[in-house]
Image (cartoon, rainbow, N blue to C red):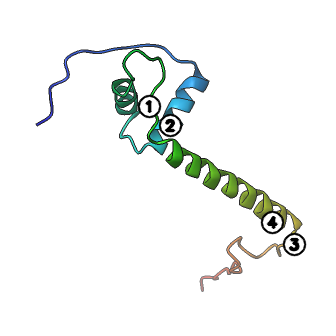
Amino acid sequence: MLKTRTRMVSFRLSQDEYEHLMDLSLADSARSVSEFARAALCRLQVGSSTLAEPSVPRLERLEGVVQELAVDLRKLRRLVESLPYPEMPANEEPGGAPNTVVDSV
């Protein structure tokens, strides 16, 4: 059974700090930034100002995947930009089907 949480801690972050915290919480599979922050604070080592970081290897793997995706995205962008774009006939829709007009009799 979960303990009822009745106390609240609040502090302000810069936009960059908040985005970094969001990235960390996603990498840690937390349900929310608040859940991640609570768990991180609870992992504080007694007498130390450093957080225990059990998710560092997972975060490093995620960073590697993101870097690979960035490289692939750049390659894809260059490939798409190098493709010749044929001119579209005036009577053709972007989906490739020609416009047909039906005359009523």
Instruction: State yes or no: discs 1 and 3 in contact (Cβ < 8 Å).
Output: no
Q: Secondary structure at mark 3?
A: loop
Task: Tell me the CA gap for discs 4 and 3.
Answer: 16 Å
Q: Position of residue 52 (x, y in %)?
A: 44, 31
| Amino acid type indicated by mark 4 | Val
Instruction: State yes or no: discs 4 and 1 in contact (Cβ < 8 Å).
Output: no
Counting residues from the start of the chain, the first of labels 4 and 2 encountered is: 2
Q: Which residue is mark 3?
A: 87
Counting residues from the start of the chain, the first of labels 2 and 1 encountered is: 2
* Above or below 89: residue 45: above
* Above or below 83: residue 42: above
| Amino acid type indicated by mark 3 | Glu
Q: Which residue is mark 4?
A: 80
Instruction: State yes or no: discs 4 and 3 in contact (Cβ < 8 Å).
Output: no
| Residue at image point 47% right, 17% down | 49
Q: Which residue is mark 2?
A: 24
How many C-alpha atoms fall within 10 Å of the one at disc 1: few (<14), some, or many (≥20)? some
Q: Which residue is mark 1?
A: 52
Counting residues from the start of the chain, the first of labels 4 and 1 encountered is: 1
Q: Position of residue 45 (x, y in %)?
A: 39, 23
Camera-near label (4 vs 3) is: 4
| Residue at image point 84% right, 61% down | 78
Looking at the picture, tell me which residue is in the foreground, 57 or 10.
57
Camera-near label (4 vs 1) is: 1
| Amino acid type indicated by mark 1 | Ala
Q: Position of residue 9 (x, y in %)?
A: 34, 14
Counting residues from the start of the chain, the first of labels 4 and 3 encountered is: 4
Q: Secondary structure at mark 4?
A: helix
Looking at the picture, tell me which residue is in the foreground, 24 or 46.
46
Task: Tell me the CA gap for discs 4 and 1.
Answer: 44 Å
Task: Tell me the CA gap for discs 4 and 2.
Answer: 33 Å
